[in-house]
Amino acid sequence: MKKFIPFNDAAFKYTGVWQENGEGQIVSYHTSAQLEFGFLGTEIKIFASFTSNEFVKLFLDGEVILPEITDEGIVISNLKNNSHTLKIIAIRHCKIHFKGINLSEEGNIFATKDNTYIQFIGDSITDAYPGFSTAVADELKVDYSIVSLCGISLVDKWGWYKLPEGAEYRHGMETTYFSLQNLQETLSPAEYDFKV
């Protein structure tokens, strides 16, 4: 495998909250950020790491697969030499650090069909995976993402999640939606730039 295709290739379709980290990668944030693309070839290497391997789902041609995930990434081989679709979903606030893919010289990458897109925003009912949000998206056959946190309210200074030590007040979705992290991850969440 010799052909490297970086994360910023136009064929990669990102749904949810993603932002470049300045280290040659793009990183997913919040629940259920997704990456999807099509490729032609018999083998693919995905240069990605995850904050938790158990909270990542990979779909090859619509079927869940369980490839070995190593520090170097993921290799999927022995595929039929035809078109394939790969989707990677981060669930339960897992972060994907994606650098790109390797294909064999004769391999090719292509964009998948754009679908209607829905973004679910909310608290624990929205946050569950699988749950209400995923069931609605699956039934409607749409692309989706989820920005949610258990115990969060829509407005600041309300909510039910434990207030972290040092925090002045609970951030509601009115603040968290525009941030890459929530108060339970850091007291100084970075702002989302909405470029992806």
Image (spheres, rainbow, N blue to C red):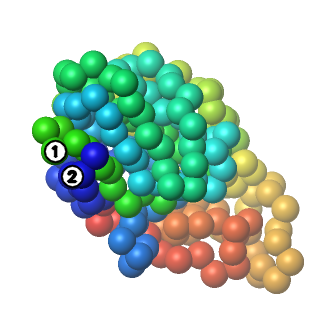
Q: How busy is the neighbourhood of tag 2: few (under 14 within 10 Å), some, or many (20 plus)?
A: some
Question: On screen, 6 above or below 102?
Answer: below
Q: Where is residue 142 in the image (x, y as percent from the top left)?
A: 34, 28
Residue in the foreground of this view, choosing between 77 and 161 = 77
Q: Where is residue 116 in the image (x, y as percent from the top left)?
A: 27, 32
**Can you say which quadrant of the picture contains the C terminus?**
bottom left
Left-right relation of 7 to 156: left
Residue corresponding to mark 2: 3
Question: On screen, 20 above or below 113?
Answer: below
Residue corresponding to mark 1: 105
Q: Which residue is drawn at 36% across and 71% down?
A: 24
Q: Can residue 132 be seen in this view?
A: yes
Left-right relation of 112 to 119: left
Q: Can residue 145 be seen in this view?
A: no
Q: How busy is the neighbourhood of tag 1: few (under 14 within 10 Å), some, or many (20 plus)?
A: few
Q: Position of residue 131 (x, y in %)?
A: 62, 27
Left-right relation of 85 to 11: right
Looking at numbered disc 1 in the image, what kind of residue is underneath it?
Glu
Question: On screen, 47 above or below 66?
Answer: below
